[in-house]
Image: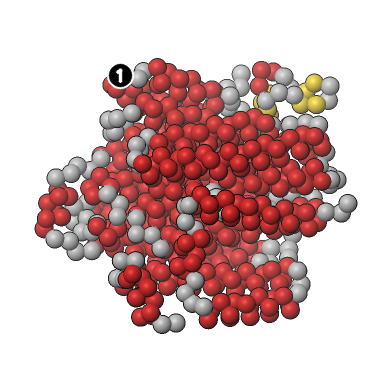
Amino acid sequence: MNFLPMIIVFPLIMAIIMNLLHGKEKAVKYLTFATAIVLIALPFIGEYGYYYFSGHGVVDGWISGIAYLYNPAKQAVIITLSLIASLVLITGMGEKLKNNMFVTLSLMGFASISAIVLADDIFNLYVFFEIISIVQAGLVFLSGTEEAYKAGLRYMIIGSVAAALMLLGITFLLASTGTLNISDMKHHLLTDNPMVYGGLLLLIVGLAYGSGLPPFHNIKADLYARSKGFISAMLQTYSKFVLVGLMLIILKLFNGLSYFSSAHAVLIALGVLAMVFGVVMALLQSDYKKLLAYHAISQGGYVATGLALGTPLGIVAGIFHAINHVIYKSALFLGAYIVSCKRGSNLHKLGGLLPLMPYVAFMVLCAKLAISGVPPFNGFQSKWMLAEAAMQVNMPEIAIIMIIVSIGTFVSMMKAFYLIYLKPVDEETLKEYQGKEVPKLAVFSLFVLTALCIIIGLDPSLITNYLWDYAREIGVNYCLK
Amino acid sequence: MDYNKFQKDLEKEGHGDGITVGAFFTGEFTLYLLFIFGALIIGRVYGKTLMTLFGLSALAFSLSTFPIIFQFKKENSNAINYQLFWLSVFLGAIAFCVYLTARW
């Protein structure tokens, strides 16, 4: 028996149970821990191949009902997602207030992202795309600050435009192909017509909104910056895998078709603009969480560029960078959470934390070097592959922009490291620091993530071996003249 | 580029320390480099040298209006009117690009 749907159904059931346990903090904590452990096992219980929900399958030559496609590349994404979700849930157990709401929303988010990654039917994808938008706003609201409410509401308002446009795009595609199943739809898209163009255009709008590509990068960055550090780790993981899921579907449907060339260029341009806008905005920030939030946008740009190149190497590099990015960026957000427990996140009010938490500083430094693309960390391996993919299609300009953005990333990361850990502070501030505890569960999660940055950096084939088959299936080799 | 003038502008915002000025400068240069390499690749994709030269001369002009980073920061504000303006521009621009290859 294939237990694949349990990846989506189990977290949804647990989300409902958690909701019923309102006020029973101890029960919520034990159950959260048990759920976090089970989440890690979930990606291994499904079988590879197509799965037709409720046994619908092929009816009169058409695939009907909800369909999922599971393969090693999707498994690698879901393993990473479950690992980050487990670590964030474990870190969240240290928080006292509204714990069950945080767990409920995180599990709903996990189920939605898994469904988006697995979906082989575009309407099912849209439903979970909507759920994840609401979950993200809900997780930000949990911070309880005025700015958090504003950020969440802004995200919902813009989302009401973008998600509605995406639904219209799906309707256009349905109208011109007669099916919602992605594998079926592909066979009906060989010739172009205005409806197909409209569908593609509006899918790109949904992609940009869900993953924080321009012009949605500011609202997305605001969303990460206004949440608690460990929740931001979860939010940026969601966005990165929405990007991977939607981009793979766009490539599966359109890659290699003659009329895709302009949209292809648009996708590459969006990736490059996200890279540059993200890093430039990060360089201008004086708030640590905002700085990290804009870096999440910038790294999303790398992922989008790699995937948008559309070659097998580009697709592998893009997914690999997404996986690496969620690992080191979650470590950085957890580091920011630990720092904020001492004295907020304003860089100009922090400083002198190195002697108080040298191990945390070392682990955060490793994550900062990973995001900057310094060997032997995982970020170096995927950025190297991305540059190689850009060179392979004869676009050295993109490889150069990637390197320039990495330099900007290094500058802003070192600026933040100096201002938080190395800048001298007065005695009074040191006393204030000593009076506040470091959340131990967050340090544990930070340790696991840092270890992963090093292990994947030393042996990238641990991840890339999972990705090649699917990348060869949907990728197309070409070279710019 | 006048470092002191740049620093004075930043001091007005309360961030005139060396490390922040350095970060702003890096941001400024990153934007210029995007324009340069962007102009090169667009020119190469469409095979038009004249277009690249025009792009680079536009860039040279923009260099004379240094710094652009403050304007860039303003345009990236979270005010909903800016957001909706850029959303409209985005929709128009990608519609233009996507329909560029239409054959009917």
Amino acid of disc 1: Lys
Q: Secondary structure at mark 1?
A: loop
User: Could you tell me residue A236's position as x and y percent?
Assistant: 47, 45
Q: Chain of mark 1?
A: A
Q: Name the residue located 71 percent from the left edge and 43 percent from the top edge.
A: A252
Please indicate, yes or no, whether residue A185 appears anywhere in the rendered image: yes
Q: Quadrant of residue B35?
A: bottom right
* Residue at image point 61% right, 41% down: A161
Q: Picture coordinates of residue A46 (x, y %)?
A: 58, 27
Q: Quadrant of residue A368?
A: bottom left
Tell me the residue that label 1 is attached to. Answer: A24
Q: Residue at left 49%, top 77%?
A: B66
Quarter that holds the N terminus of chain A:
top right
The residue lying toward the viewer, choosing from A244 and A128, is A128
Q: Quadrant of residue A392?
A: bottom right
- Residue A457 visible? The answer is no
Image quadrant where one finds the C terminus of chain A? bottom right
Residue A387 position in % (x across, y down): 58, 63
Above or below: residue B68 compared with residue A365: below
Query: Does A48 sit above or below residue A3?
Result: below
How would you rate the neighbour count of disc 1 (Cα within 10 Å): few for under 14, some for 14-19, many for 20 or more? Answer: few
